[in-house]
Image (cartoon, rainbow, N blue to C red):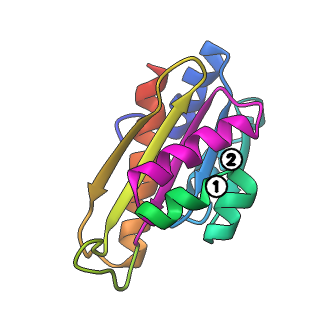
């Protein structure tokens, strides 16, 4: 990570922006990293852990049609998760993560593939896919968490 979590929080604080997270394969690790820092409550608004498809639909408003057409591990779902986190919070900036931490995967969606979304009020939502490779569940989750924090920091610069 290019910037530390305390520095990321300081950037958000300086810009007067609040952050939300929408996580699937990381199970709340990004929210935990942000809230591990004392005083983060003035910046971190809330986190959604939406591990199941039903949770993505119920808590974030992800479309069942999008899930059916693209699957949970897709940029389309990552976009809807990030935008849903903004819509269902008072945050200004939201990051989303959905992926296959492993073990397992398929020919089309291999272990280590993680899709990210970054939504900010008044801006177009960005999405990207990173193939971390079959590093093992723990390492994929840690790499995805670090990447999400980097996305937030880049948006705050």
List x then y, in percent, for residue 10: 59, 24
- For label 2, the crowd category at 10 Å Cα-Cα, with few meaning under 14, some 14 to 19 and many 20 or more, is some
* Residue visible at 47% across and 25% down in the picture: 124
Give the extent of the magenta segment: 71-100
Q: Residue at x 28, y 81 (%)?
A: 106
Element assignment for label 2: helix
**Residue 131 relative to residue 22: left or right:** left
The C terminus is located in which quarter?
top left
Residue at image mark 1: 32
Residue at 65% across / 43% down in the picture? Answer: 84
Residue 86 part of the magenta segment: yes
Residue 11 position in % (x across, y down): 55, 21
Q: Which residue was labeled with disc 2? A: 35
Depth check: give the residue in front, 9 or 80.
Answer: 80
Give the alpha-carbon distance from disc 2 to disc 1, as whole Å: 5 Å
Q: Is residue 31 magenta?
A: no
Taking the image as shown, residue 92 lies to the left or right of residue 145, namely: right
12 and 105: which one is in front? 105
Secondary structure under tag 1 reads helix
x then y, percent, for residue 65: 55, 59
- From this view, report whether residue 143 is shown above or below residue 80: below
Q: Is residue 37 left or right of residue 98?
A: right
- Check if mark 2's residue and mark 1's residue have beta carbons within 8 Å: yes
């Amino acid at each position: 990570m290019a910037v530390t979590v305390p520095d990321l929080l300081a950037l958000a604080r300086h810009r007067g922006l609040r952050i939300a997270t929408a996580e699937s394969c990381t199970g709340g690790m990004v929210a935990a990293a942000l809230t591990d820092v004392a005083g983060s409550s003035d910046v971190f608004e809330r986190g959604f852990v939406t591990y199941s498809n039903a949770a993505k639909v119920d808590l974030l408003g992800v479309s069942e049609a999008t899930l059916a057409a693209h699957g949970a591990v897709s940029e389309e779902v990552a976009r809807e998760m990030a935008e849903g986190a903004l819509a269902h919070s008072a945050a200004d900036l939201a990051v989303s993560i959905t992926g296959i931490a492993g073990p397992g995967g398929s020919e089309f969606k291999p272990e280590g593939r993680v899709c990210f979304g970054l939504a900010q009020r008044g801006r177009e939502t960005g999405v990207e896919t990173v193939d971390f490779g079959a590093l093992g569940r723990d390492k994929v989750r840690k790499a995805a968490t670090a990447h999400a924090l980097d996305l937030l920091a880049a948006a705050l610069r």
